[in-house]
Amino acid sequence: MTGTTQRKDLYYLFRGRMEKMVPIGPVAEGLRMNGHFSGTVVEGEGKGGHIELVDYFRIRPDGVGVVDAREVLTLDGQTVSVDVHGYVLPPAGLPVPTIEEMLSPDFVWADAPSTIECFATFRTAAPALAHLNRVTVAHTGYVNFATGELVVEAHRIADLARRTRDVAA
């Protein structure tokens, strides 16, 4: 992955769209769905790379989404596997739909962003991208389930820790 970031603290910026959301059904932890997304790294490390992902997503009864996503990043003919874990927080101030409501054929998602709080790790055999095998990033951003818009800012955990140490010093 190559490229220069526009902001010092940003590792990369990903913009994507939800292609489809496939309901699996109720499970012990809530409602299970497969979310299919794709998009492009538009800024920072890996700029121009294409990402496709499937999120084996669960929505808990409290409205919090549990992210368990597998991504494939393709850049200059090379591939990287990305594992993403964390949470999607429901839009503030809106009522949380029940699982039964979400399973209804008449259900429509609220046109409001849900906040992303995740982390990601990378795996690749491509020599030019091998440095990613030791990188962990924090993903922040949002997904709008009504419009399908997905925006993720990645910040390298090591950089965040360094900044914290610098502030404490």
Image (spheres, grey):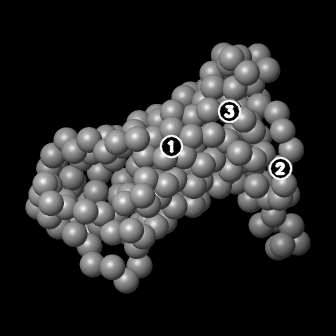
For image coordinates 50% across by 43% down, the residue present is: 84
Q: Tell me which numbered mark, 2 or 1, is placed earlier along the sequence.
A: 2
The picture places residue 121, in percent across and down from the top left corner, at 59, 38
Q: What residue type is labelled 2?
A: Thr
| Residue of label 1 | 84
Does the rendering let one see residue 151? yes
Q: What residue type is labelled 3?
A: Gly
Foreground disc of the pair 3, 2? 3
For image coordinates 68% across by 17% down, the residue present is: 77
Does the rendering let one see residue 69? no
| Residue of label 2 | 5
The C terminus is located in which quarter?
bottom right
Position of 155 compared to 116: left or right? right
Q: How far apart are marks 3 and 1 (CA)?
A: 17 Å
Q: Distance between the residues labelled 2 and 1?
A: 21 Å
13 or 147: nearer the viewer: 147
The picture places residue 80, in percent across and down from the top left corner, at 62, 26
19 or 24: nearer the viewer: 19
Q: Do the residues labelled 3 and 1 touch (CB within 8 Å)?
A: no
Callout 1 secondary element: strand
The label shown at residue 49 is 3
Residue extending furthest bottom?
93
Position of 120 compared to 24: left or right? right
For image coordinates 39% across by 68% down, the residue present is: 111
For image coordinates 49% across by 55% down, the residue present is: 149
Q: How crowded is mark 3: few (under 14 residues within 10 Å), some or many (20 or more)?
A: many
Q: Quadrant of residue 82?
A: top right
Q: How far apart are marks 3 and 2 (CA)?
A: 14 Å
